[in-house]
Image (spheres, grey):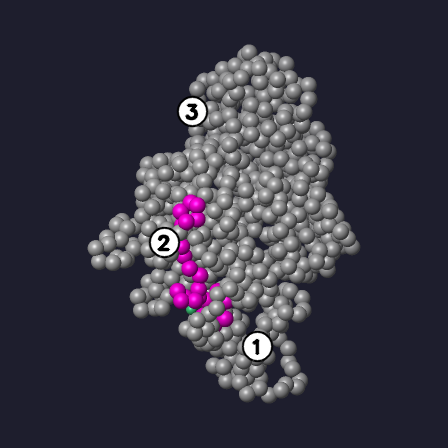
Amino acid sequence: MQGIGFRPAVYRLASGLGLTGFVYNDTRGVTIEVQGSVERINKFAERLKTGKDLPVLADIKTIHLEDIETVQGDAGFVIRQSKTDGTVLSQVTADIAACTDCLREMQDKNDFRYRYPFINCTNCGPRYSIVKTIPYDRPNTTMSVFKMCDKCATQYKDVGDRRFHAQPVACPVCGPKISLCDNTGGIIEQDSNKAITRTAKMLLAGKIVAIKGIGGFHLAVNALDNQAVLRLRQRKKRDAKPFAMMADSVEKIRRYAVVDELTERILKSPESPIVLVPKKADCGLAPAVAEGVNTFGFMLCYAPLHRLLFAPPPRLASGDAGAGEGLDVLVMTSGNISDEPLICRNDEALEKLGRVTDAFLTHDRQIYRQVDDSIVHFIDGQPVLLRRARGYVPTPITTENNCEKDIFAAGSDLKNTFCYVKANQVIVSEHIGDMEDASVYHHYVNSVKHLAGLFEVKPHVAVCDLHPGYLSSRYAASLDGVELIKVQHHWAHIASVLAEHGLDEKVIGLECDGTGYGTDGAIWGCECLIADLEDFERFGHLMYYPLAGGDLAVKEAIRPVLGLLSQAYDSEFELSKFGWLLEKIEPNVEKQKLILQQTQKQVNTVNTSSLGRVFDAVAAMAGLGGYNNFEAQLPMALEASTTQGLDECYDFEIIEDEGQLLDLRPMIRQIVTDIRQQTPVENISAKFHNGLAAGLLALAKKARKTTGLDKVALSGGVFCNRYLANRLIRLLKQDDFDVLFNRFVPSNDGGISLGQAAIAAKKISQS
Ligand SMILES: [Zn+2]
Ligand SMILES: [Zn+2]
């Protein structure tokens, strides 16, 4: 790993043992030559392996030891300059939250970095977000424009110092500076302390402030002020999607949400992600922060600047009361407009966020790469990444085998990530976003090139989704001189689970997803695959139902509702009989008629086994709304309304046709009956989730009977639903299945690129 203080630690260890020689970083890793008695050299190697003398972020993957016949006797031990030649096999590290040592210094009035918002050391601070190219040295970062002062330079050069070769090292004299500007860029305040104090005051007064952090801008607003939160929603054009929040202590988060020990550990981890935690009822937070979900997304302050914003402001002068009470909890949502990429440049922020924000708390350290906050939630009691970005990227996954050719995996078009394979490293990109937005596609192309540069990857093989319309697939196909492999979407999902667990064997894959292009041209979504990395077979799936309207079907719930009802009631289905149910979903009767005609005559209609759309339909029929303002709004509302502890379930059938078909027609009819009888939505939702879990278990049991396999891999976006995932995992385990699921990459389409890469690597190994 680069930039975590490894070489100084080696220096201290070697000098301490009286050994001579040298250490240097090159692009393949760290090379150490030590000279001295065999006994001491062995001791050195021993202590290197235990890791006790190494920096907290060090994680040695492999050590290769070699005797050297002839050495030039060195007088002492030295750290040599980084070398740039050779193959890149070392890691560029992720951005790391401010460490406790730095935070202590920042609060120390006698320290020359007292209240300095950019304090960092080799154990913490920005990395990936400021690196332009390798090796990770100051001239190759956005810190190159700041000339170190004598004090900083002394620490930077002192091998015994915590800041030895800490590339972003800086202080109030020589480093980046804060300024507070109005929404047109006019300077309000340039003194760091005054700017921060004024920002806190503005936020307490209900203002919106855009704050430049590590990976981009956040839009901040007081999370206790509902009017302010509503104003942010309106200005950001974000109607309903829950906002993430930030606090400066776990104790504060506990006032509003349930935080157990594991959650606390993750909140406080160096990666410092957003963690989804169960809401406390009537906790006093602005309702507009997160409606229609049962969790809050919380993170702790991770940049020193965040800490200062929350810290009780010092009295700036006699007679100044400071900001009074400090901030409690802030909404800290991504600084972007609707689904565009996160904004990280000052000029772009001014242009695009000027209409949204009342002020900018900004600084002059350039963010080279925008990196979103990562999101973690819990499945089966284990932390699982829902969005993998800041703190986790670009740390590679290392594999047992070396891949002979470099691979580029293009990913999926929604929640895109892409992935590279180089030798034994699998490097999954940060969350890029939904490609339907042109600026996201542009960001994708830039990111693909940048990451290739950082890891010096030259792909000979590209792998992409089977979907002919995906922009990611087209991009992969456009690469010159590269062999192209196409992989079915849901197979890639299951392969991502295999890759994470280092498995290369056949499993029963249960895949529950929105939509993906199938090998038969239909839109698949709920699949039971018998799969390994070499091939897959479609053992069963959700019975196809007709879905009218292409892209609109993802938004308008009336479309899957009419598809499922007309299938469940067949010739008995008439709009007039169901008016009572349909009017709350789509009041326009003419539109209902038109969509039904389309559905029945198969005009602009696809056959699909999408489970995501079934969730949309059930949520809509149960009265939770008729439209997804953001992806999975209706399914999330359905999950949030589920009664815990109810074991009843709706019926399903497994029909043997071409494969095993999961038939939900009985379930749909029972749901309609329950709604007519005004059964509470909490119970309908529980019975629906339970019925699905039972149906999926039944499919898995059939597959086990046929194949003898008992390992089940779960993947797909629907497994972001904690109730369904937890229940199904419990049922499978009770039935003696060995259950695997995604943890390191999201089970949604953010994990697709890893699965594609694993399948391509397998293919290369066989050729
Ligand atoms: Zn530090
Ligand atoms: Zn300095």
Q: Which mark is residue 189?
A: 2
| Chain part drawn in magenta | 162-186
- Vertical comparison of 387 with 577: above or below: below
Where disc 2 sits, the SS reads strand
The percent position of residue 436, horizontal first and vertical second, equals: 61, 38
How far is mark 3 from mark 2, CA to CA?
Answer: 55 Å
Residue drawn at x 68%, y 22% is 603
Q: Which mark is residue 80?
A: 1
Badge 1: residue crowd in 10 Å (few <14, some 14–19, many ≥20): few
Where disc 1 sits, the SS reads loop
Residue 178 lies within the magenta run:
yes
The percent position of residue 527, horizontal first and vertical second, equals: 64, 36
Which image quarter is the N terminus in? bottom right
Q: Which residue is more in the foreground, 707 or 605?
A: 605
Specify which label sits upstream in the sequence, 1 or 2. Answer: 1
- Vertical comparison of 82 with 305: above or below: below
